[in-house]
Amino acid sequence: MKIFSAQQMREADQATMNTEQITSLELMERAATQTFNLIHNRLQGSPILIHVFCGIGNNGGDGLVISRLLLEHGYNVKTYIVNFSDNRSKSFLINYDRLKEISKNWPIQLKSEADLPEINREDMIIDAIFGIGLNRPLVPWVILLIKHINKARCFTLSIDIPSGLYTDKAPDDPEGVIYADITVTFQLPKLIFFLPQTGIYTRDLEVIDIGLDRSFLNQSPGIGILISKNEVLPLYRPRPKFSHKGIYGHCAIIGGSYGKTGSVVLATKAALRTGAGLVTAYIPECGYEVLQSTVPEAMVITDNDDELEDIKLDFKASAIGIGIGLGTSIKTTKAFEEFLSENKSPLLIDADGINILANNPKFLEKLPKNTILTPHPKELERLIGNWKDDFDKIEKTKAFSKTHNCIIVIKGANSITVFENQLYVNNNGNPGMATAGSGDVLTGMITGLLSQGYDPLHAAVFGVYLHGSAGDIAVQKTSFEGLIASEIVSHIGASFLELFKTPNVEEPIQQ
């Protein structure tokens, strides 16, 4: 599923109106009716009091249509107009008049802090104040209204995006944003739902199809792609009957230092579980017995006693994952530089490998084209510098990717794979995966896919998805708190099987 910018969504609306020869008002009626249907199906005529807060633009127009439909179906509704400006959209004004025609109780006008309404904990709120149209800071009394709504702590549904959010930058006031229990967004998801600074404002997301022009949607590249099973299943490469281990590559996992051999154990197991034909761990001698006893399927090459000083493989690796547990000592840094100078294999760099690159920017010139980097936030910051917000972070990561011809996986709740100008936003995984070693597992999984001949971008996107899926399967047995990285490894096989399962429509799909 594509992710569009606010401007692209407006263009999609216009293309739909042109193709279908309909007005903005008719498209608004369609979108709001779809939203009402979702609400009605869940409430089933519940007698709760519903507060609908409408702005004075098209998002407010959506809210007015929903209010009218709720009243027509017998719901107990109070509608409010948030008068933050004298400008009103044409569609808003028409729907305002339509609402007045069916109700003796006209919408309540809110103009200042003195007008804040009473809201009880057991009520429901529908937020239709701004949507994607917000383009300037909120006036102070509207911020107080939003804080008042949030303080009520009742169930809140936002239309398209929570009010107070921009679509292309962080909010001016983090407390001046609606906290939605669910956001009903139109046609395609927006990037804000998947970033740490802005994704916190909606607990659940529902994307509803409002019938926007398919040709336009298909032809427009979008700013990103939301990665789920439908997007990764075509990447899977089935195995022929007459396979042997030599077909699936011989990869190397290079890393470790005294006290940090476990990272290589996790990555090595993960590479094997992901299907690499052969895996060799290249480690300091101090980790030899650990590797041989915990991963009997792997081969081991050792370097110096406690750290890597001279990285020399005695075979041509089909892919290499390097950096986990490596350390950044002078000797190891020199060995890393020499390795980069000589390496010709597809490459993934993680952890201390990234830290060495950040400390020695000239090493970046030695990276093979389409090298994959998998930093956590602090490692990314060391690599690309500070950022003012998540959107700035993404722009700087794009620039880095283009400059150095590399693929970057920004690890997080919705890991984002960045390749030049395109974003691939992962849509699985869970908070239990915020645990030591989880990133090492990902290193092994992507390296294992590279080893089998997957295109580097496909290996990164597919590996991130399988990693999240394995974590989601494992956490059903362990809880978030109880999940450890080795259990993610144990469920990699199940993550492949999950690709081919059909959801049971009679049971809710766990998010």
Image: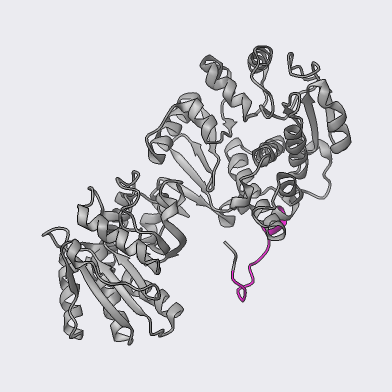
Nearest the camera: 23 or 204? Answer: 204
Label total for image = 0
Q: Please indicate whether residue 375 sits to the left or right of residue 446 in the image.
A: left
Does the magenta segment cover residue 108? no
Residue 458 locus on image (x, y percent): 59, 41
Q: Position of residue 373 (x, y in %)?
A: 57, 31
- At a point 74% along the width and 24% down the height, the residue shown is 257
Q: In this rendering, would 241 be left or right of 191?
A: right
Q: Is residue 231 above or below residue 439?
A: below
Q: Position of residue 179 (x, y in %)?
A: 39, 59
- Image point 78% across, 38% down: which residue? 247
Residue 499 inside the magenta-drawn segment: yes
Magenta part of the protein: which range? 496-508
Is 394 drawn above or below residue 49 in the view shown?
Answer: above
Residue in the picture at 40% in, 48% down? 222
Q: Indicate how the structure is coloured in the image.
A: one colour
Specify the farthest residue to the bottom: 74
The answer to which image quadrant residue 332 occupies is top right
Residue 277 shows in the view = yes
Which quadrant of the figure has residue 26? bottom left
Q: Position of residue 460 (x, y in %)?
A: 60, 40
* Residue 42 to residue 60: above or below: below
Q: Nearer the viewer, residue 338 or 410?
A: 410
Residue toward you, 176 or 152: 152
Taking depth in this image into account, of 142 and 165 the one nearest to the observer is 142
Q: Which residue: 76% across, 34% down?
A: 262
